[in-house]
Amino acid sequence: MEPQVLYRVCYGTSTPNPFQKSLLSFRPALLHQHRRHRVLHHDYPAVIPQQSSSVRGTFVRGLTDGDIYRLDIFEGNEYERRRVKLKILDVEGNEAGEGNVEGEELDVETYIWVAGEEKLVDGEWDFAEFRREKMHNWITSSDEYDEVDEAVRTHGNDPTGGRGSNGSISDKLEGTKDKVLKSAV
């Protein structure tokens, strides 16, 4: 839901250049029949299927295979990427959902908590509280992103073809200079 965290995962920085920002678009959305909980002893939320509940979140368009690769690593084994149907919010209401105007329904993927409900707090995760009290830690800390950064550095099954943090070309392309020169001649 927080673009700066998404940018940090996908681009290696929470403040990417305008071109990188323009690659993604964000829309408010509603996921019915699910609930967002707080995770015990952690700052992040968990979404699980639950009847008679809805989760307000963000639909992101423009993610590449490489971005999804990084997000899968970032979310780890506590989550599983699953197909769900959500509604785009044409008008976003208040936290209680009053004033929401639902629009187009989309078939999308999201991360669903699979690490066990015993690790969840019975209460809604508060996005406003996260932004106010915790987000700074997620923007300034590199610990939360170590696995993603390491995967990008080592290129293990990286579907981006060696595009590293901030879009840099990695050493994966080293040794190809002669091939490129021969094909250019």
Image (cartoon, grey):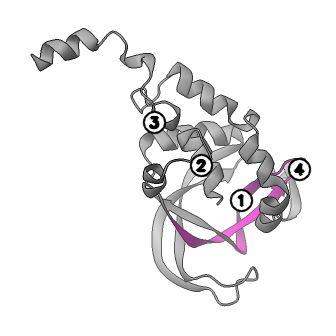
Q: As shown in the figure, which amino acid type bears the numbered disc 1?
A: Ile
Residue 130 shows in this picture: yes
> What's under tag 3, amino acid-wise?
Gly
State which tag comes first along the sequence, 1 or 2.
2
> Residue at the spot x=51%, y=37% of the render?
166
Q: Find the residue positioned furthest to the left.
A: 185
Q: Closer to the observer: label 1 or label 2?
A: 2
Q: Which residue is mark 2?
A: 15
User: Is residue 17 found inside the magenta-colored segment of the image?
Assistant: no
Say which amino acid is labelled 4. Answer: Leu
Q: Are marks 3 and 4 in contact (CB under 8 Å)?
A: no
- Closest to the camera, between mark 1 and mark 4, is 4
Q: What SS does tag 1 mark?
A: strand
For the point 21% across and 12% down, which residue is it? 179
For the N terminus, the quadrant is: bottom right
Q: CA distance from mark 1 to mark 2?
A: 30 Å
Report x, y in % for residue 163.
43, 31
Question: Which amino acid type is shown beneath numbered disc 2?
Answer: Thr
As drawn, the label of residue 40 is 4
Q: Secondary structure at mark 3?
A: helix
> Is residue 50 rendered magenta in the image?
yes
Mark 3 vs mark 1: in front: 3
Q: Are marks 3 and 1 in contact (CB under 8 Å)?
A: no
- How packed mark 2 is, by other alpha carbons closer than 10 Å (few <14, some 14-19, many 20 or more), is some
Labels 3 and 4: the sequence-earlier one: 4
According to the image, label 1 marks what residue?
48
- Near mark 3 (Cα within 10 A), the count class, few <14, some 14-19 or many ≥20, is some
| Contact between labelled residues 2 and 1, with CB atoms less than 8 Å apart | no
Measuring from the top left, give residue 184's x and y in whole percent: 13, 19
Question: Who is closer to the viewer here, 121 or 152?
Answer: 152
Residue 72 on image: x %, y %: 58, 40
